[in-house]
Image (cartoon, rainbow, N blue to C red):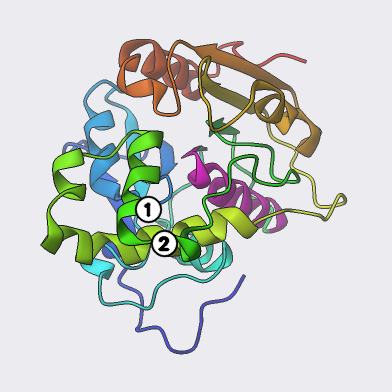
Amino acid sequence: MTIRDDRAPLVPDDVVWTVDDGVVGHRRSLLVLPHAGGNAHNYAQWREPLSDDVRLLIGQYPGRGARFSESLPRDIGELAEPVLHCLPDDTDDLVILGHSMGSLVAFEIARALTRQGRPPRALIASACRSPFLPNPSPVHAEKLTDDELVAAIEARGGTDHAILNEPELREIILPAIRADFAIDDRYRFSDETARLHCPILAIGGADDPIVPAEALARWSEVTDGPASTEFLPGGHFYFQQQSDAFIAIVQAVIDGAPVLHE
């Protein structure tokens, strides 16, 4: 993974948000990677229900927030590598969580950390097919009009309809969403030798029309560590309706509880 030469110098605080409520001292960390079109702001509210000793880190992708003026990403490396580069130096006891496309970004970051000899303690893949599988629900955003793209986004859920229906806001957010969907459509990991060694929990919505259960379950095939699959009621953004149960599962993984099994 490499950063393109045409990118401006990275500002770490713009690339990785640290949401810790002012708690001082080194703690366990949870790194969250957003979904296609997602913004770090969408996940900042997860700080409150997590235990006080957990530092919440959230990746911010190019083309949104303080990184709005950056060139839009063209591949998964241009989403993952800046986050990896900007992780705080004391990020040692780390659990990585991605939602939807963010799970693929999380996987690439976990692979890079493993190569560096500092693998994450666990990976949580939410609502996403295993990395070596083709996308079971490609969007083909490059072929869609703005109205068609908005309809596809609304069908997945997770985005405020008022934002999508405001012309000026559409003009701002749709380019980044198109870029993310194109990356998600194309991505397919093929190096069978570059496996993870950490535990993996794959979790999704029982009624998710985007990611079939069998595609979620095959995350076990990319690690030599223990792996398990769990489902909560709901669709692609199931955690919005099941927030208490979801955060409890995430907290249990951070705490090292036996959520993961062979």
**Where does label 2 land, which residue?**
178
Q: Is residue 139 left or right of residue 111?
A: left
Residue 9: assigned label? none
> The N terminus is located in which quarter?
bottom right
Q: How far from the left and from the top, in percent, is residue 167?
A: 14, 60
Looking at the rendering, which quadrant does residue 45 occupy? top left
Q: Is residue 126 above or below residue 65?
A: above
* Circle 1: residue type: Leu
Residue extending furthest toward the bottom = 6
Name which residue lies at 57% across and 36% down.
128
Q: How far from the left and from the top, in percent, is residue 63?
A: 31, 67
Mark 1: secondary structure: helix
Q: How far from the left and from the top, in percent, is residue 207?
A: 51, 16
* Circle 2: residue type: Arg
Q: Nearer the viewer, residue 119 or 233?
A: 233
Name which residue lies at 51% across and 77% down.
3
Question: Can residue 236 be seen in this snapshot?
Answer: yes
Q: Nearer the viewer, residue 110 or 246?
A: 246
Looking at the rendering, which quadrant does residue 50 occupy? top left
Q: Nearer the viewer, residue 185 or 47?
A: 185
Asked if the stretch drawn in magenta spans residue 107, the answer is yes
**Where does label 1 land, which residue?**
149
Mark 2: secondary structure: helix
Magenta stretch, main secondary structure class: helix
Q: Is residue 84 left or right of residue 64?
A: right
Q: How far from the left and from the top, in percent, is residue 41?
A: 23, 46
Q: Which residues are magenta?
A: 98-115
Q: Is residue 164 above or below residue 53?
A: below
Q: Is residue 97 above or below residue 110?
A: above
Question: Alpha carbon of mark 1 to alpha carbon of mark 2: how far?
Answer: 8 Å
Name which residue lies at 34% across and 33% down.
157
